[in-house]
Amino acid sequence: MPRPALEQPLSLRLSTWLPYRLFVVTAQIARPLEAFYGERFGLSQAGWRILAVIAERDGASASEIGRAAGLDPFAVSRGIGQLVELGFAKRNTGKTDRRQAAVVITHPGRKAFDEIAALGRAIEDRLLATLGAEERAVFDSGLRKLQGESAEIEAMGWRALVAGDGS
């Protein structure tokens, strides 16, 4: 059954609104991580995200990187350029389409990624240590559900939500 259309403005308190609370946690975690990889390696946020993608998916194309990292084509292009300039990545000709480059991580890039990932894991470990085992399991399950629903919300767009076409 479709949800009713939004008829009147509903009260929204930013400090208790779930998306904002998730954003605040993310931002508080991202700032020290970004300071580390920026100071230590001269990486931008896009550069770090792309490095993380190619560390997992070596040989990804720019469009694959953009989708995986949530970056627009301009940011992907600049980020790849930064990684190549720093010696953390190389562009190789695509295997199936010679017009499409495959981005591969280099040995220095892997070393940089491993250092940054170690700090990322330490942050994650500290956050998760505040939860008991049962809380972590419930949190993980809930987060999986929120990720799925947020993807549906993104796909349907705001117009469907306002019109009440989302179910």
Image (cartoon, rainbow, N blue to C red):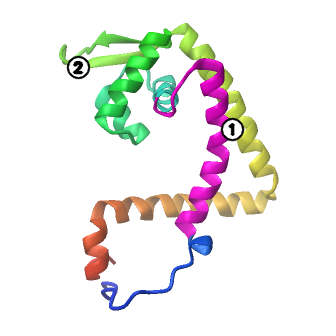
Image height check: is 34 above or below 164? above
**Circle 2: residue type:** Gln
Classify residue 41 by image quadrant: top right
For residue 145, side relative to residue 94 (left or right): right
> Earlier along the polypeptide chain: callout 1 or callout 2?
1
* Residue toward you, 70 or 131: 70
What residue is shown with label 2? 100
Label 1: few (<14), some or many (≥20) within 10 Å?
A: some
Image spot of residue 50 (x, y percent): 45, 28
Query: What is the tally of numbered marks visible in this picture?
Result: 2
Image spot of residue 144 (x, y percent): 53, 58
Instruction: State the mark number for residue 144.
Output: none
What is the span of residues highlighted in magenta in the rendered image? 18-46
Q: CA distance from mark 1 to mark 2?
A: 35 Å
The chief SS type of the magenta part is helix
* Residue toward you, 133 or 160: 160
Image spot of residue 56 (x, y percent): 50, 27
Classify residue 156 by image quadrant: bottom left
Q: Determine the residue positioned at 26% across, 15% down.
A: 94
What residue is shown with label 1? 32
Regarding mark 1 in the picture, which secondary structure is present there? helix
Regarding mark 2 in the picture, which secondary structure is present there? loop
Q: Determine the residue positioned at 44% across, 60% down.
A: 148
**Circle 1: residue type:** Pro
For residue 140, side relative to residue 87 (left or right): right
| Camera-nearest label, 1 or 2 | 1
Image height check: is 72 above or below 25? above
Q: Determine the residue positioned at 55% across, 64% down.
A: 20
Image height check: is 87 above or below 102? above
Image height check: is 122 above or below 55? below
